[in-house]
Image (cartoon, helix red, strand yellow):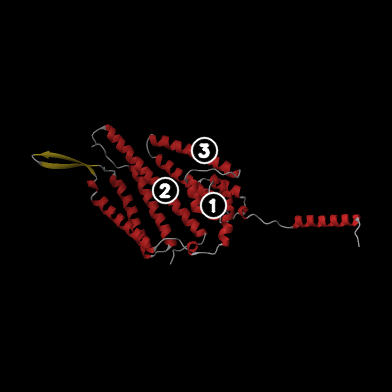
C-alpha cells in the first residue's frame, strides 16, 4: 500500500516534533572539566583563587577536589603571592634600601594580581616562567599553557579509568632515606646548638702578627652584644628541630612527619627573620668603609634569600601535603 504525499508529510512532521521534544527534555551530559566542588564555574573559581592572593589560593586548594584547572590556579596563586608577601615583609625591616625594594615588589605583585584575575575571568591562560611549570607538576597537569585546559579536562577521567597502583596509593620514598635525613638533621641541630651557645666567640676576624719568628693571633669577634637577644630564638628553633626529628624517627607516619617538618621549617624561618631584624653583626674590624658596607649588604642579602627560600619550601611542602591528602595518599609505601 502506497503512502500519499500528504501522509508522508504528516509522518515527517510528527517525527520531527517528537525528536524536538526529546532533545528539549533530555539532559545533556555535563563536561567533567566544568564540574567544580562549589558549583561555581571554573573561571569564577580561578578568578577567586587570585582575588585574595595566596589566602584564597590555599582555600580553593583545600575545598576544590573536582576541577584540576582550578587547583592549578590555586597552586599558582600560592607560589606567586606567598613568596612575594614574605619577601615584602622581610624587606620592610631593612632601612632605606629595603623599603624601596619592598615598594617595587608590591608594584610587581599588584600588576600580577590584576593581570591574573582578568585573564582567568576571561578563561585565558597566562604563563609565569618557572612558577607555572612548578604548579603543573604539583597538581599533576602536564603540557604548556595552550594545552592546560585540555590537560585539566582529561586529568580526572584518566585517573578514574586507570587502576590504582602503588604509586597512586602511597607517598614515594624509602624509610631508610627518611631516617638518615632525620638523623642528619638532629646531628646538625645539636652541633649548632652547642657551638652557638659556647663557642660563638670564635666567629671572628683573625689577625696574625709575627715577632721574633713567633706568630701571635688575635681575633675580633663579629657578633656583638645583640647576639644574646637572638640566641634564645635560635635555641628554641634548634630544640624544635631536634624534638621534631626524634618524633619522626619514632613514629614514621606521613600524617605526622609532614606537619612536623612544616613546624620545624616555620621556626627556622622565624629565626632567620629575627636575625635579619636584630642583625647582631659588627664588621668594624674590616680594613675600610667600603668592605664594611659591602659585607653588611652581602650578609643581609644572603639572609633574605635564605628566608625567601625557606618560605617557598614551606609553601611547596604544604601544597604537596594537601594534594596528597586530596588524592588519598596518607601513608608511606610499606
Q: Position of residue 119 (x, y in %)?
A: 57, 42
Which residue matches tag 3? Answer: 111
Which quadrant is the N terminus positioned in?
bottom right
* Mark-to-mark CA distance, 2 and 1: 20 Å
Graded by Cα atoms within 10 Å as few (under 14), some (14 to 19) or many (20 or more), the crowding at tag 1 reads many
* Mark-to-mark CA distance, 3 and 1: 22 Å
Mark 2 or 1: the one toward you? 1
Which residue matches tag 2? Answer: 311
**Mark 3 vs 2, N-terminal side:** 3
Residue 331 placement, left or right of 25? left
**Mark 2 vs 1, N-terminal side:** 1
Whether residue 57 is visible to the viewer of this picture, yes or no, is yes
Q: Position of residue 10 (x, y in %)?
A: 88, 56
Q: Residue at x 28, y 35 (%)?
A: 292
Asked if residue 218 is positioned above or below residue 263 in the image, the reply reads: above
Total numbered labels? 3
What mark, if any, has residue 113 been given in the picture? none
Residue extending farthest to the top is 289
Q: Check disc 1 and report its element: helix, strand or loop.
A: helix
Graded by Cα atoms within 10 Å as few (under 14), some (14 to 19) or many (20 or more), the crowding at tag 3 reads few
Q: Position of residue 77 (x, y in %)?
A: 51, 47
**Mark 3 vs 1, N-terminal side:** 1
Q: Check disc 3 and report its element: helix, strand or loop.
A: helix
* Mark-to-mark CA distance, 3 and 2: 22 Å
- In which quadrant of the rendered view does residue 125 lie? top right
Q: Residue at x 26, y 54 (%)?
A: 194
- In which quadrant of the rendered view does residue 214 lie? top left
Residue extending farthest to the left is 212
Residues 123 and 63: in front is 123
Which residue matches tag 1? Answer: 71
Q: Position of residue 143 (x, y in %)?
A: 53, 49
Amino acid at each position: 500500500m502506497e503512502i500519499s504525499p500528504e501522509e508522508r508529510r504528516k509522518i515527517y512532521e510528527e517525527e520531527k516534533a517528537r525528536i524536538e521534544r526529546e532533545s528539549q527534555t533530555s539532559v545533556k551530559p555535563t563536561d567533567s572539566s566544568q564540574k567544580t566542588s562549589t558549583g561555581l564555574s571554573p573561571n569564577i573559581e580561578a578568578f577567586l583563587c587570585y582575588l585574595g592572593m595566596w589566602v584564597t589560593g590555599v582555600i580553593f586548594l583545600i575545598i576544590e577536589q573536582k576541577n584540576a584547572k582550578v587547583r592549578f590556579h590555586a597552586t599558582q596563586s600560592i607560589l606567586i603571592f606567598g613568596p612575594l608577601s614574605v619577601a615584602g615583609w622581610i624587606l620592610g625591616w631593612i632601612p632605606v634600601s629595603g623599603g624601596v625594594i619592598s615598594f617595587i615588589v608590591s608594584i610587581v605583585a599588584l600588576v600580577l594580581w590584576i593581570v591574573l584575575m582578568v585573564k582567568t575571568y576571561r578563561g585565558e591562560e597566562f604563563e609565569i616562567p618557572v612558577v607555572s611549570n612548578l604548579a603543573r607538576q604539583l597538581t599533576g597537569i602536564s603540557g604548556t599553557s595552550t594545552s592546560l585546559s585540555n590537560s585539566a579536562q582529561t586529568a580526572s577521567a584518566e585517573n578514574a579509568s586507570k587502576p590504582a597502583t602503588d604509586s597512586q596509593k602511597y607517598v614515594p620514598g624509602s624509610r631508610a632515606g627518611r631516617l638518615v635525613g632525620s638523623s642528619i638533621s638532629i646531628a646538625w641541630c645539636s652541633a649548632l646548638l652547642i657551638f652557638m651557645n659556647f663557642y660563638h666567640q670564635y666567629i671572628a676576624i683573625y689577625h696574625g702578627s709575627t715577632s721574633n719568628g713567633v706568630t701571635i693571633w688575635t681575633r675580633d669577634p663579629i657578633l656583638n652584644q645583640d647576639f644574646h637577644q637572638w640566641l634564645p630564638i635560635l635555641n628554641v628553633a634548634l630544640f624544635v628541630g631536634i624534638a621534631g626529628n626524634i618524633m619522626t624517627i619514632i613514629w614514621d607516619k606521613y600524617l605526622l612527619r609532614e606537619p612536623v617538618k612544616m613546624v620545624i621549617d616555620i621556626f627556622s624561618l622565624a629565626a632567620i627573620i629575627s636575625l635579619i631584624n636584630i642583625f647582631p653583626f659588627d664588621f668594624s674590624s674590616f680594613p675600610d668603609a667600603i668592605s664594611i658596607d659591602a659585607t653588611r649588604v652581602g650578609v643581609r642579602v644572603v639572609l633574605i634569600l635564605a628566608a625567601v627560600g625557606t618560605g617557598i619550601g614551606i609553601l611547596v611542602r604544604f601544597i604537596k601535603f594537601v594534594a596528597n591528602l586530596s588524592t588519598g595518599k596518607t601513608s608511606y609505601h610499606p
